[in-house]
Amino acid sequence: MEKFIRKRVTNARNDIFSGITVALALVPEAVAFAFVAGVDPLVGLYAAFMVGIITAAFGGRPGMISGATGALAVVMVSLVSEGNAMGAEGENLGLYYLFATVILMGFIQMMAGVLKLGKFVRLIPHPVMMGFVNGLAIVIFTSQLGMFPEDHDTSFWMMLGLVALTMLIMWGLPKIKKLSKLPEALIAILVVSGIVIFGHLDVASVGSFIRDGGGEGLKGGFPVPHLETFSKIPMNLETLWFIGPYALILAAIGLIESLMTLNLIDELTDTRGNGNRECIAQGGANIVTGLFGGMGGCAMIGQSIINIKGGGRTRLSGIVAALTLLAFILFASGLIEQVPIAALVGVMFMVVIGTFAWSSFRIINKIPKTDLFVLILVSSLTVIFDLAIAVISGVIVSALVFSWENAKRIRARKRVKEDGTKVYEIWGPLFFGSISAFNEKFDIKGDPTKIEIDFVESRVSDHSAFEAILNLVKKYEAEGKTVHLKHLSEDCKILLNKADPKFKEIIIEAIDDPRYHLVENPEKFTKGLGEYDVL
């Protein structure tokens, strides 16, 4: 028990410092994404606080950071603009339609968790994951380029120098043994901020960034329920028809980004999170956020990696980040507004370097060309469109490639018994992709009157395969020939018997082949059975 407590107390220091660093990085991100979505900065900041604290406390991945994200913001732009157009000028109905959409999005995400759909993220292939992180790293990098002054004057070069200094501190600090345990991102932000403030350097800060975007600053109060949402917009089927598609898209993007970030953090920490619990927590957080006037959110890969690299491992780090962000909004807005944008851009550039899968360059000539194509495709679509389109496209292409490769593996070994019966021993998976090749193996007109089809080395995988067997048997019977089927899977036998009672006569139930019993009853399996030891 003492060891357990000591371990928790020791890591608490890392969690607290890491959480403070993440909070500093959350401010400009939340503000920027609010501007992208076309809403007030406080709407983004409230979302970062509420989504962050709820998912940190109840989510399925300790150490993962959630908040307002760009992937969701780009979808919200058209929602807000269309919502504004549906009301009179100055009503800003788009904001209230956004809150209603975020609430509906949360219910959809919670339903996904209740139905245990989070486990399907395991079906995402590794090339898709690598493409996802590479594309996201490029998106984070390009989004930071917009923070630099357009003119290459003194302010541009000054900001570039401060960004480089931030990156140098973050790179060098861990290499100094006595300082290696300090939170390098937080130290870098404090050092660069001190240089700018005490040196009276004229560079962009968080405060000037907000004011340039049309905001009035970070000062705000504690979030309160926005119940006027339900009175501002009509609660009818027309509203549901309008916000429904947006809610579905936002829910899908949010869950995909959250679950893929969860998988990435699992790999970095060599631990395992709970995807279904994360779905429920994300959904609940978005419901609360919508009710309290936030723009919704999901897991943030950049801030999550900052947290993990800074030593944040438990729920405490995410809770500290959210509470620190709220403290900035309530009490320290003047201080946080003085933080130079250059320091935060430097931190994000280091996140880009840590996020990008540099190993993808080393394995270009070592992986199948189809996997390389999927990796490049997902990276490109993440940059051009959004995460949901990229990941779904990558999974579809990977599934089609897998189906095509397995379709080519169907084989039929043929032999004739002493009594003249021709036996077809089928090898390989029988499913929708291999049906055409399966049918080509048989010579219906040239075969003898007795046929036996043996499926002991094959697996009947889907309804298409069942239909192929049914049609094949009917073709042989139309030629006046008898067919017997052996070693069919139990589910296939049930389907065939339901389709036609005649199959009870042609399916051989009495099995004398020990291989079949091993396949059906692996618990009977013992050593010394040669090639069947692997079953």
Image (cartoon, rainbow, N blue to C red):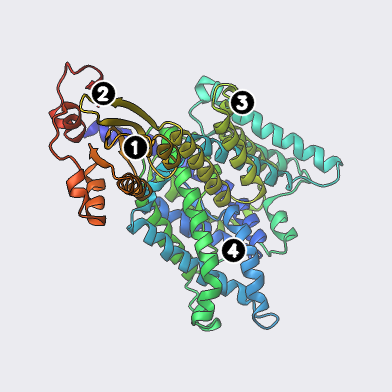
Q: Judge left or right: residue 313 versus residue 373.
A: left
Q: Residue at x 17, y 47 (%)?
A: 505
Disc marking residue 9: 1
> In the rendered structure, which amino acid carries the disc numbered 3?
Phe
Compare residues 198 and 479 and report the one nearer the observer. Answer: 479
How many angstroms separate mark 4 from mark 1 (CA)? 34 Å
| Label located before the other in sequence (3 or 2) | 3
Q: Judge left or right: residue 53 versus residue 32.
A: left
Q: Residue at x 37, y 35 (%)?
A: 446
Label 2: which residue? 534
| Label located before the other in sequence (4 or 2) | 4
> In the rendered structure, which amino acid carries the disc numbered 4?
Leu
Q: Are there few (<14), some (14-19), or many (20+) residues within 10 Å of tag 3?
A: few
Q: Are there few (<14), some (14-19), or many (20+) residues within 10 Å of tag 1?
A: few
Helix, strand or loop at mark 1: helix
Compare residues 69 and 176 and report the one nearer the observer. Answer: 69
Image x and y of residue 335, in percent:
62, 52
Picture layout, residue 511 above or below residue 147: above
Label 3: which residue? 361
Q: Are there few (<14), some (14-19), or many (20+) residues within 10 Å of tag 4?
A: many
Helix, strand or loop at mark 4: helix
| Label located before the other in sequence (1 or 3) | 1
| Label located before the other in sequence (4 or 1) | 1
Image x and y of residue 74, in percent:
63, 58
> In the rendered structure, which amino acid carries the disc numbered 2?
Val
How many angstroms separate mark 1 from mark 3 (CA)? 40 Å
- Which is in the foreground here, disc 3 or disc 2? 2
